[in-house]
Image (tube, rainbow, N blue to C red):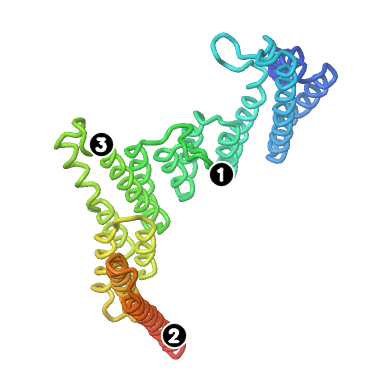
Amino acid sequence: MAELVEQSLDDMVVPLRDLMDRGIFSETEIKSIVSRRREYEYLLRRRVARKADFLRYVEIEMKLERLRKIRTKKINEQQERKESSKIPDRVKKNNSGALPIGDVHIIQLIHLLFFRVIQKFKSDVTLHLQHAAFAKESKSYHKLTTIYTEALQYHPRNVELWIEAASHEFFGITDLETGETLFGGGSMQGARVLMQRALRINPTSQDLWIQNFCLELHFIQKLRGRKEILQGTTSQNNDDDEKTTDYTSGKIPIIVYKNAIDNIPEDIAFRMHFLDVCKSFPNTEKVEDYVASSIEQNFLDKPEAWIATATYRGEKMMKNTTTTTTTATTTIEDDSSSSPTKKKEIEILREKILSMEQLYKQQLLDMKTVSEEEKRTI
């Protein structure tokens, strides 16, 4: 055991020397780091290693990495103030463009510790999630695919892992402030493959079906945006246009929905969830109509289905009425904005529409209340 520990410490000499030479850590601090690492390496190589020791070691190294970042930033700022925009050789990147070995050393060590603890405690899914979270935090995006692949091998029944892996394939890593893609993404084929594997293993998972449905709707919006950009240019040929039209018509989301209700046939709330998802995306009326029709046809004797379809039809009717009325009133205002009589007519029309909306909503609420009372009576 002692030889293995000393060998692992010997491998740390070069990066630690780099950190000390650049003034990020003093010689005393380096000795303290080595001493602490030696202690934990012995703990991790015991015959019966404890998960708590691994996690404590990881936590300490994360704190050390945060300290290194703060000090590196401070040193760079000091040098910039002294020499304007010139950065001295001791803090700039090497000729290949890579960071100095000391800057990546602690992150690499933390990844190694995660892989070691996962090999020891394969059944703990939280370790994989923590590892993925650290990879995102440390911008080690290239390791995420490996992390998710290994996690799914050990935990194929974990729905959250499948969804995260598929999301990473399609969306990649995006900047929350700017919305720009920082790494990966754009692989709809990879995302679909993951979703299909997940559903073969977990065919009755409602979350997986809903997320698969969302994925297809996201892809449709992406294709519509691409079509709008390329519309009118010579680079868009007829074949591509036909394929895009097939995708954006909503056929694939409807197929996903059909497969979902085949595997989960008797849940009205599950089907209503698809309607709620459609409302988050534009131009999904065709898909919404299909979902509402399936609820109406398959649950003729269920009050919940009556309420659900009535609510959907009513909301759709009110939406169309409001759109038509808004267009009409806008036209009237444009035609005779100076006429007091026309303005009065517009106000009366608006009041009638608001009264209709309130009356309709109250009726729906009364229907729902009666249905709940009947359930309690039964």
Left or right: residue 76 compared with residue 203: right
Disc ID at residue 369: 2
On the image, the x and y values in percent for residue 221 come to 32, 47
Residue, disc 3? 230
| The quarter of the displayed image where residue 68 is located | top right
Residue 162 position (above or below residue 69): below
**Residue that extends furthest to the bottom in the rendered view of this protein:** 377
For residue 307, say whether it is visible: no
- Residue 215 image point, x, y percent: 36, 48
Measure how far apart labels 3 and 1 are at the Cα level. 49 Å
The quadrant of the image that shows the N terminus is top right
Residue for point 29% across, 58% down: 284
Name the residue tied to disc 1: 123
- In the image, 18 versus 201, the foreground residue is 18
Is 175 drawn above or below residue 324 in the view shown? above
Outermost residue on the right side: it is 28
Q: As displayed, is residue 340 above or below residue 243? A: below
Q: Quadrant location of residue 227?
A: top left
